[in-house]
Image (tube, coloured by chain):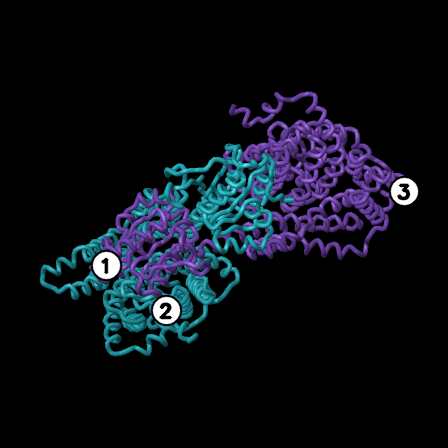
Chain colours: A cyan, B purple
Amino acid sequence: MQLRTYLPILDWGRRYNRQTLASDLVAAVIVTIMLIPQSLAYALLAGLPPEVGLYASVLPLVAYAVFGTSTSLAVGPVAVVSLMTAAAVGRVAAEGTVDYASAALLLALLSGAMLALMGLFRLGFVANFLSHPVISGFITASGIIIALSQLGGILGIPTHGHALPELVLSTLAGLGSINPWTLAVGAASLALLAWIRVDLKNWLGRFGVPTGAANVIVRAGPVLVVLLTMAASALFELGGKGVALVGEVPQGLPMLSLPSLGLDAIQALALPALIISVVGFVESISVAQTLAAKRRERIDPNQELIGLGAANIAAAVGGGYPVTGGFARSVVNFDAGAATPAAGAFTAAGIAGATLLLTPFLAILPKATLAATIVVAVLTLVDFSILKRTWTYSKADFAAVALTLGGTLLLGVEAGIALGVGASILVFLYRSSQPHAAVVGQVPGTEHYRNVKRHKVETVPGVLSIRIDESLYFANARYLEDLVYNHVAATPQVKDVVLMCSAVNAIDMSALESLEAILHRLTDLGVRLHLSEVKGPVMDRLERTDFLAHLTGGVHLSQHQAMQAIVGGRTRQAPEPEPETHVAAPLE
Amino acid sequence: MQLRTYLPILDWGRRYNRQTLASDLVAAVIVTIMLIPQSLAYALLAGLPPEVGLYASVLPLVAYAVFGTSTSLAVGPVAVVSLMTAAAVGRVAAEGTVDYASAALLLALLSGAMLALMGLFRLGFVANFLSHPVISGFITASGIIIALSQLGGILGIPTHGHALPELVLSTLAGLGSINPWTLAVGAASLALLAWIRVDLKNWLGRFGVPTGAANVIVRAGPVLVVLLTMAASALFELGGKGVALVGEVPQGLPMLSLPSLGLDAIQALALPALIISVVGFVESISVAQTLAAKRRERIDPNQELIGLGAANIAAAVGGGYPVTGGFARSVVNFDAGAATPAAGAFTAAGIAGATLLLTPFLAILPKATLAATIVVAVLTLVDFSILKRTWTYSKADFAAVALTLGGTLLLGVEAGIALGVGASILVFLYRSSQPHAAVVGQVPGTEHYRNVKRHKVETVPGVLSIRIDESLYFANARYLEDLVYNHVAATPQVKDVVLMCSAVNAIDMSALESLEAILHRLTDLGVRLHLSEVKGPVMDRLERTDFLAHLTGGVHLSQHQAMQAIVGGRTRQAPEPEPETHVAAPLE
């Protein structure tokens, strides 16, 4: 039972049959065709040799098939994580060195270990701190950076940097040395890929090709472009004309190995690994959940962490680099009918076969084609509509998007994420430190009490009812004190203050001390303090203190009962008016 | 008007008369007597020459008298800030060097500028993030560290370090070289000071000395001990017997100057200056507010920031080091009848006079006496009762106290504060990311709806009412989705879900997207979604989106009205039962 939780394959493996096998095989073929050029291209984006992308598409997929819970998620190299890998690894080693490749393996190992540990200790909630606006801003900015970083590859000029300023400057500096042959290959690939994505399906439709077949042809488009440019490269001997080619690639699959663990490198890569883990997980889980919901399946987020963790550890062992679930690829996998995680394992087999067969031919592939593949893929990530949506809904959310977007563009991926998350948390803390509060009165004819400024309500002279719309904790405890004193000072005839606690979900030690200070000072002024609508968990906690014993007023189940008790008590006391300095229960 | 806000002296200065002058003068004399030995001792604690303590008790007090709002707060060198100064300055310069003294001036300038800016920009709320438990743990740990750091002075051995491990080791290492003469002076001072504090007042009472006079004599106790040990030092020529004396002190007051501003030093001292500012402000404002409340006066926290900022800038200009409002000293000032901030200015005049007259005699004062003064003063800071109080009330608050206390003792003042504040914020975020929620039912015979697990309530089959006890934001948005799906999955006959939002004080963009996802999926299942008791500010925001247009159920003023509308609607539809797949308003 316990084992089956951690090894979902034991569950779906039992129900595996010929029909699911057929569905999985069809999906695997289509995803394999789509994944080959993407793997090569994203490895280049990560600053790694292209074959590393293929390696990262073999063992990780098998590991995810064993440990993952999503039937549709297609794991492998993805654009955003490749960019983050380049940014992180570029800080510990120079591109093209052995150290660079082993740092990428170490990054995958660290990220895999972190994901797996988060899954085992059920820490998936940390991903919640990446809010929707922050993720949206981050993905859009990453798409822009990636597209721009590939412009150099299309123009045949060297560019560097993982943020806008350095990228733009190095691109501008290289404009004088554009290689026309590279530009021709790059621009042609770009145009062809764009046409395939936008128009090919309609065009095929006009020739009577059925939709299913047309879809497969569109998915195979990038492979066709790769084959075409390889042919052109051979025909025109582009390598001799200054066009950067992929070059000799080691044939076969790499030996299994463990990355070398230098303590310095671990320290330098630990934080990037954490950020990559969380970003990769958030992206992956949202795709997986969206697709699962369409089939009324459920995803276990903590088991997904273990699945992605295993995939990244497998990437480290199998010569790859950090991987996660890809959005477009998973949708294709889903649409193609993948029925179980086995589809991923079949895809892995397909990629392994391709690696063995294709690597000899890759030497003549122009890098510009791969750059064009990336540009067409990532432009779908760029979406500015979140700016408009958040601007209308909430300026604080807008600020989080804008800060993440701007920070990522100008300072890089890690600084951008950190700014966004930091700003979201600060805004939340600031808001809850200055809570909304309202003086309330009775909605005539009901037992309901609402804000006197928003509703036509009735109040009783001498009774001040304040509803506080926030949990009381250290950051707003002093604010609460000021609020009550200011209201009481403004209405000197007040004899009873009721704090309506319907929105108070917790009272921490600091807030308790503030409530004690309020009680103390109100008692000095001859004013009674009441509480109403105190929630169960809050009441449990207050009962462990002597605050309730000193409370001069009462604790009432509802605001209405509080008002009845206060006004009723008055009526009974009417013949003998309460003296100004009367204190119902002295505090000290 | 604007000017009077920033210069409170213009306000109280107008109402100044002979009576307030007399009160202020009496208070100033008593505080001056108390402040002289404290100033010398705390400067030594900060690693500075003793006269710096006197300088820090002149101009800062005048500046606070002009800009401060508290009639009772006595500003000057205090124990905790002196320890924090030693820890911060010790990292940029070696004790006893010119650099050390000018780094202390720079620290005061930075801290003063930060306080003044926080005041001008009304940023006093940042102090709220130092919770009561964190401050309590910090003060207790500081008291222990300070007392232990003075043990070396009393035993006549050199010790170093600003945290327990280094202090304990260096004290143990020195135990072999205890100077018996120093120990004799230190132990005698300690015993005498303790006796003065604990017993002298009763003893004087037995001899018929009136309470008022006895109080003044007790306050003057440390000065008497200083005079006695100076006499002993001269008589027994203690300087020649290895007893550390204060030594030659420059006579007169220092020239006004500005600290030199090295960029490296500013960078190194900026964070410590911020922590010192916030800790000093929190300590100061709580003393000032407690004393003000006793006289029904009000303190303006933002103007207090300006007052303390001015005091620290004055300390930097006048050869001092960081200052703040002292607790014991302010209580003495209050009890002695200080009527306006002018009492502080008179104290400054007293200290200035003492500096001119006393400095020639200070050379023969044993440092052990000053160490004993500090020990007796700081032991009152040590208070472990907060551990017990928080343990009973809330384990999270206990963890914050324990972490701050342990962190400060073991790692030092800055790490301790950072750990405490970080832990408090993380606990708050974690709690709000897993909010309390309750299925609610009607309390029979009322319009109230409470938790079905805590109250005897009535529910209607087919209607699920969930009250969420937290604002909805990015960190709990996904939790909310899971919560609703799990409840709906567990009760398949549900046709209506009501989210009772009485405790929802805000819904951010991430939570809005989660609500849209919930609505979408419930609509797919043929379940209607209603909201009840939505607060005004939340409703305003929702009205800017198309969420309400797609909402399949309604938004109801109260939970009771929601139930009436749902059950009423059913009754009317009774003859023609609603089909399973009916959707009141399709989402797409």
Residue A142 in sight in this render: no
Say if mark 1 contacts mark 3, CB within 8 Å.
no
- Please provide percent x and percent y for residue B551: 28, 51
Q: Quadrant of residue B65?
A: top right
Residue type for callout 1: Ala
Residue type for callout 2: Gly
- Please provide percent x and percent y for residue B563: 33, 53
Spatial CA span between label 1 and label 2:
47 Å
Sequence-wise first label, 1 or 3: 3
| Residue denoted by label 1 | B574
Q: If the image is split into quadrants, where does the C terminus of chain A sit?
A: top right
Q: Quadrant of residue B35?
A: top right
Disc 3 crowd, CA 10 A, few/some/many (<14, 14-19, 20+): few
Q: Nearer the viewer, residue B39 or B109?
A: B39
- In the rendered view, tell whether residue B307 sits above or below residue B377: above
| Residue denoted by label 3 | B236
Disc 2 crowd, CA 10 A, few/some/many (<14, 14-19, 20+): many
- Give the residue displayed 76% in from the left and 34% down from the top: B33
- Please provide percent x and percent y for residue A449: 41, 43
- Please provide percent x and percent y for residue A335: 23, 65
Spatial CA span between label 1 and label 3:
106 Å
| Residue denoted by label 2 | A68
- In the rendered view, tell whether residue A255 sits above or below residue B584: below
**Element under label 1?**
loop
- In the rendered view, tell whether residue B250 sits above or below residue A510: above
Q: Are marks 1 and 2 on the same chain?
A: no
**Chain ID for label 1?**
B
- Give the residue displayed 57% in from the left and 52% down from the top: B419
Q: Nearer the viewer, residue B306 or B218?
A: B218
Q: Residue furthest front?
A: A575
